[in-house]
Image (cartoon, rainbow, N blue to C red):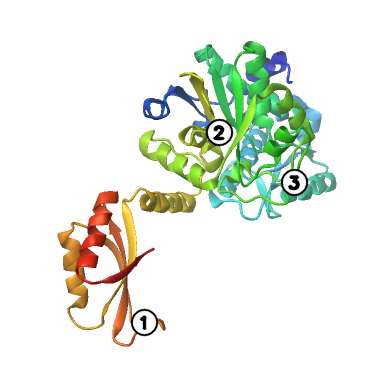
């Protein structure tokens, strides 16, 4: 594991630049899951994620000679911003290689902090390979996002802050991508209090570290696919794996639907904006991935908040449909004057608010003289939607729910 002394040294370095993020009680979440839940809100960190800690500690530890040549990193976004910010602090050039599908908000963030962005590869691992070769070509110092002891020590400072505020935590839940965050946090936590249970959470679409942990040997994935782009790491790092198997108690996984539910829950009920990777710990709680023998004090690391606005829109839209606050349906009616008005009168009687409507009489599956009306409605829950369906059936409409 990472020595506690190294993590405390890192804390002295990173305290020059980081914001000591809140470690706040989450009453609504606590009540919902039956435990005492505290959220470590690294989404409020200066760069929007915890990665600043590890990146700054690594670059600070390099020394002037290595730093002045410049630094380079591969990242899906959060490490990129951490490196760019830290390089700017030390007034050295930085190059960040990012996967081509990286959300615009993260690309823009890197550029705002003075980093040069190079887009290459379909995922982190392909971007990493490109960056390693570019580092040799330009003779820049490569800053690994997780498989580096100085980086991991920097991330471990999160555990120091958590345990300074709540020393008697029973559990800490930590997202896992490459494993640097949990390696640092678990190393610190276990040396301070060996009784603490540290649980990692992976995305089902990026399962390599969990499979490695369960099998007892390094396993890689053929590909990754998840909305949690910050933890979408294809291959297992032997460096972090060896630490994780020593200091982590268990690893659970959540799927994209569960992650999306957690993002929406945090936004609505906790007033916290979180990216996919940052929401996995809460997703694990909401979907009962961890068995608690009795109510416990649980710290959850909200690792980042750099979510793309288009993703937020998609998650909200799907969340409204799933929670029966929005309804989409296609209604077939006779294509003649007054037909659409009659349909809207029925919906008005049911107090359903029409937010979008489309009219199509050209669909090849329609009988001549019929038309399809596509309607999106704001509704007040499951019973309201059932009442709308009953009204449509009563008036002999043919319809399908989208």
Q: Counting other residues with Cα less than 10 Å from the Cα at mark 3, is it few (<14), some (14-19), or many (20 or more)?
A: many
Q: Counting other residues with Cα less than 10 Å from the Cα at mark 2, is it few (<14), some (14-19), or many (20 or more)?
A: many
Above or below, 339 against 208 in this view is below
| Residue carrying label 3 | 128
Q: Nearer the viewer, residue 255 or 231?
A: 255
Image quadrant in which the N terminus is located: top right
- Closer to the chain start, of discs 2 and 1, is 2
| Residue carrying label 1 | 366
Residue 398 visible, this angle: yes
Q: Residue furthest bottom?
A: 368
Q: Secondary structure at mark 1?
A: loop
**Spatial separation of the CA atoms under disc 1 and disc 3:** 52 Å
Q: Is residue 139 left or right of residue 23?
A: right
Q: Nearer the viewer, residue 72 or 148?
A: 148
Q: Is residue 327 left or right of residue 396?
A: right
Write the residue at 31% across / 51% down.
Answer: 325
**Spatial separation of the CA atoms under disc 2 and disc 1:** 50 Å
- Closer to the chain start, of discs 1 and 3, is 3
Write the residue at 65% across / 55% down.
Answer: 100
């Amino acid at each position: 594991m990472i020595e506690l002394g190294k993590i405390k040294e890192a804390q002295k370095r990173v305290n020059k630049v980081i914001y000591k993020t809140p470690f706040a009680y989450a009453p609504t979440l606590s009540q919902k899951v039956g435990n005492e839940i505290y959220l470590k809100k690294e989404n409020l960190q200066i760069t929007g994620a915890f990665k600043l800690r590890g990146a700054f500690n690594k670059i600070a530890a390099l020394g002037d000679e290595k730093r002045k040549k410049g630094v380079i990193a591969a990242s899906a976004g959060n490490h990129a911003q951490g490196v760019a910010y830290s390089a700017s602090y030390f007034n050295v050039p930085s190059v960040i290689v990012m996967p081509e599908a990286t959300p615009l908000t993260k690309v823009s963030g890197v550029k705002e902090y003075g980093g040069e962005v190079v887009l290459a590869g379909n995922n982190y691992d392909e971007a990493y390979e490109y960056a390693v070769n570019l580092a040799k070509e330009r003779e820049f110092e490569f800053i690994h996002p997780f498989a580096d002891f100085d980086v991991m020590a920097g991330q471990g400072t999160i555990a120091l802050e958590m345990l300074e505020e709540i020393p008697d935590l029973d559990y800490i839940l930590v997202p896992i991508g490459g494993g640097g965050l949990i390696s640092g946090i678990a190393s610190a936590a276990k040396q301070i209090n060996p009784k603490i249970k540290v649980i990692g959470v992976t995305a089902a679409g990026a399962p390599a570290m969990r499979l490695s942990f369960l099998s007892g040997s390094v396993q890689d994935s053929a590909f990754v696919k998840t909305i949690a782009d910050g933890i979408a790491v294809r291959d297992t790092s032997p460096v972090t794996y060896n630490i994780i198997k020593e200091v982590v108690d268990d690893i659970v996984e959540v799927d994209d639907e569960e992650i999306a539910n957690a993002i929406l829950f945090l936004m609505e009920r906790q007033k916290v904006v979180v990216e996919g990777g940052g929401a996995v710990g809460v997703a694990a709680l909401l979907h009962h991935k961890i068995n608690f023998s009795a109510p416990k004090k649980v710290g959850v690391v909200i690792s980042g908040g750099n979510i793309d606005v288009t993703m937020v829109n998609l998650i909200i839209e799907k969340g409204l449909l799933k929670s029966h606050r929005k309804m989409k349906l296609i209604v077939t009616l006779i294509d003649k004057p007054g037909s659409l008005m009659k349909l809207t009168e029925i919906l008005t009687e049911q107090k359903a608010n029409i937010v979008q409507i489309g009219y199509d009489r050209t669909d090849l599956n329609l009988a001549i003289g019929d038309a399809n009306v596509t309607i999106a409605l704001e509704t007040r829950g499951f019973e309201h939607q059932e009442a709308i369906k009953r009204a449509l059936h009563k008036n002999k409409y043919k319809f399908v729910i989208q």
